[in-house]
Amino acid sequence: MVEFPAFIHIPLAEWIDAAMAWLLTNFAGFFDAIGDGILFALLRIERFLLWLPWVVVVVVVGIIAWRAMRVWWGGLLMAGFLVLIGSLGYWDLSMMTLAIIIAAVIISLALGIPTGIVMARNKTVESVLRPVLDAMQTMPSFVYLIPALMFFGLGKVPAVFATIIYAMPPVIRLTDVGIRQVSHEVIEAAQAFGSSARQVLFEVQIPLAIPSIMVGVNQTTMMALAMVVIASMIGARGLGLEVLLSINRIEVGRGFAAGLCIVLLAIIIDRITHALGSRQEYGLT
Amino acid sequence: MQNNAVSANGETCIEVKGLWKIFGYNAGELLDGELQSASKETILEKTSCVVAVRGISFEVHRGELFVIMGLSGSGKSTLIRCILRLIEPTAGEVLINGEDICSYNAKKLIELRRYTTSMMFQHFGLFPHRSVIENVAYGLKVRGVAKEERYQKAREVIAKVGLKGWESYPPGALSGGMQQRVGIARALATDPEILLMDEPFSGLDPLIRRQMQDELLEIQAEVQKTILFVTHDLHEALKVGNRIAIMRDGEIIQVGTPEEVITAPSDGYVRQFVRDASPSEVLTASSIMEQPHILLYEWQGPRAALDILGSADLDNAFLVNRRGKLLGLVRISCLAELIQRKGSFSILEALEPDLLTCTADMLVEDLFPLAASARYPIPVLDDAGKFLGEIHTSTILISMIQEREEAAEKEKEKVESDG
């Protein structure tokens, strides 16, 4: 009675493997199509970012940060960070990383915000999705790399796919919360004046949920950045790969420089999306 | 249920027949069973269903301001929501202009809410992300009215409720009273036939509340809507209602004109309510005080004060300092005399000595002795001596007379019941 009995055994790992094999044989075309779509979008974004002269990127980011944070030194600081990244020699790699983040975030938001809205309006959907989201967030992020690898092979596409899965839960959750917390009386008022369900959603619930949704966008972006580094293990080029290589070769300086660039990128993205979110306050009181 | 009042304007606008609302699972089955006549507590215990509205029937006539009064938990807010089906009734009929709206499909229900009715809420229910004018124009927007046209209508209504100049502000920038004005404007902008008001003034300060009640009556005199007004305040009900329905535990226990409710309460519950509402016993100084036509400020010199009093055609006015603290009362004759005699002097020298004052929470009963000896209006102050308003001795005397009459009536009643 000391060891757990061997006959009580659930072969979960085998089942999942079998399911994966079945999916791969029967839905290969489907995954190829998704992969091609992601790759198409990703390559456009990456080529565009690398095509842009660095000065333009620095100036545009500076202006966006200044407008969003509403202080001139905010813009200057963010632009300065970008120049620092460039001077460390990681401009191109940073742009590649950024391209993966942008692609993953756009897809996460495009899927996540509508999912959050459905979740807020439907109890059954909510009770099903809630544990799924919990699992998605607590599962070690490395686990997502394996199916991503199997579906899409090595490279950028599985990296984007794994990043989407890892980064989507916050925006779903915060959209759901944002819509739920809209005052009941305000919704009642909208209904009492004859709003259709669609009008209640688009005129009242979504506008009032925007501050919360923006927090979700911020968190999703930050999680995407964190995941991109890990996703370098399955062949996504960029800053993450640089860190990975320096671990393998025990090059402290190289790893630190690449790590610093990731931090700078994170600060720039966080400050800008955060500032955009907190601007959405209503009323003067 | 009694219905011992028939309005002069007999045309029925809203008719509610045997309306039930029960919250909980299997609520509908409850109605067929024997529990229908059981008490609220028994039902809650046996089925864990909550009965909010219990077989209510009443009629509201066209152009009438019908008040539903009851304490919190009496089901009045549920009832008013059932009339627009914001809450789906469990059983019964709601007829608006003769049509049973409970049989309406979603589309017809939306039409009804867009074109026939409007609603006001206790906490205003304004859209915080939209400006005042967008809030007011909302009802027209969902109807599909063009922007120019709905803004023009909204501007008119905003001016009517005295908020001109506030159109582009968010509601959060406005005080409570002003927010509810936006609520009134929003409700009136669609020019509805029927207005539903769910405790519209309960969230406001007593002073503002009285002012808003007055304004509601003014607006009603002008627009003559059919209004269903829910309140927990009997004073308010008596003041604004053409007829009053008193609710308890989901049932209406009396319907009548204010006069009937006061003079012939249908049972002990109503009687107790009415007794609580005996004016001088519960009225405090703050509830009968008025805002003076003018106030004089310390920094205004004697000549300016004389001019202000003269142009307002008043004999006297209160003088306050920069912080609103009362300094005293200035009489025009005293000012004129000092100006003639001295030429230059501080306005403080013209103050009337030994002025009677009272505080906002003093009962009207306790003001009676003051009223007898006061030669000027009695200023109402807060604890810090800040000026809040004034009470004219005539106001106190009138409530004193009402008090006497009621006491005599109660005495008579008591003798009758003893005999």
Image (spheres, rainbow, N blue to C red):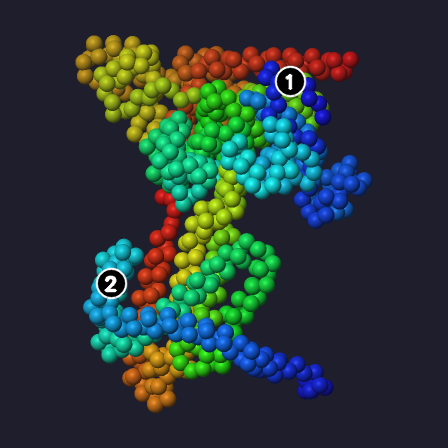
Q: Nearer the viewer, residue A194 or A68?
A: A194
Amino acid type for the residue under numbered disc 2: Val
Report helix, strand or loop for mark 2.
helix
Which part of the image, by quadrant, shows the C terminus of chain A? top left
Q: Nearer the viewer, residue B303 or B96?
A: B96
Residue marked by disc 2: A60
Q: Is residue B199 left or right of residue A61?
A: right
Which part of the image, by quadrant, shows the N terminus of chain A? bottom right
Q: Chain of mark 2?
A: A
Residue under the point 32% across and 32% down? B165
- The location of residue A128, given as percent across then percent down, is 59, 63
Is label 1 on the same chain as label 2? no
Question: Quick check: B297 above or below B33?
Answer: above
Residue under the point 39% across and 31% down? B153
- The location of residue A42, given as percent across then percent down, is 36, 72
- The location of residue B359, given as percent across then percent down, is 45, 26
Q: Nearer the viewer, residue A61 or B189?
A: B189
Residue marked by disc 1: B6
- The location of residue A104, given as percent across then percent down, is 40, 69
Q: Chain of mark 1?
A: B
Q: Label 2 crowding class (10 Å Cα cut-off): few <14, some 14-19, many 20+?
A: some
Can residue B404 be seen in this snapshot?
yes
Amino acid type for the residue under numbered disc 1: Val
User: Farthest bottom residue?
Assistant: A249
Can residue A145 be seen in this snapshot?
no
Residue under the point 39% across and 62% down? A218
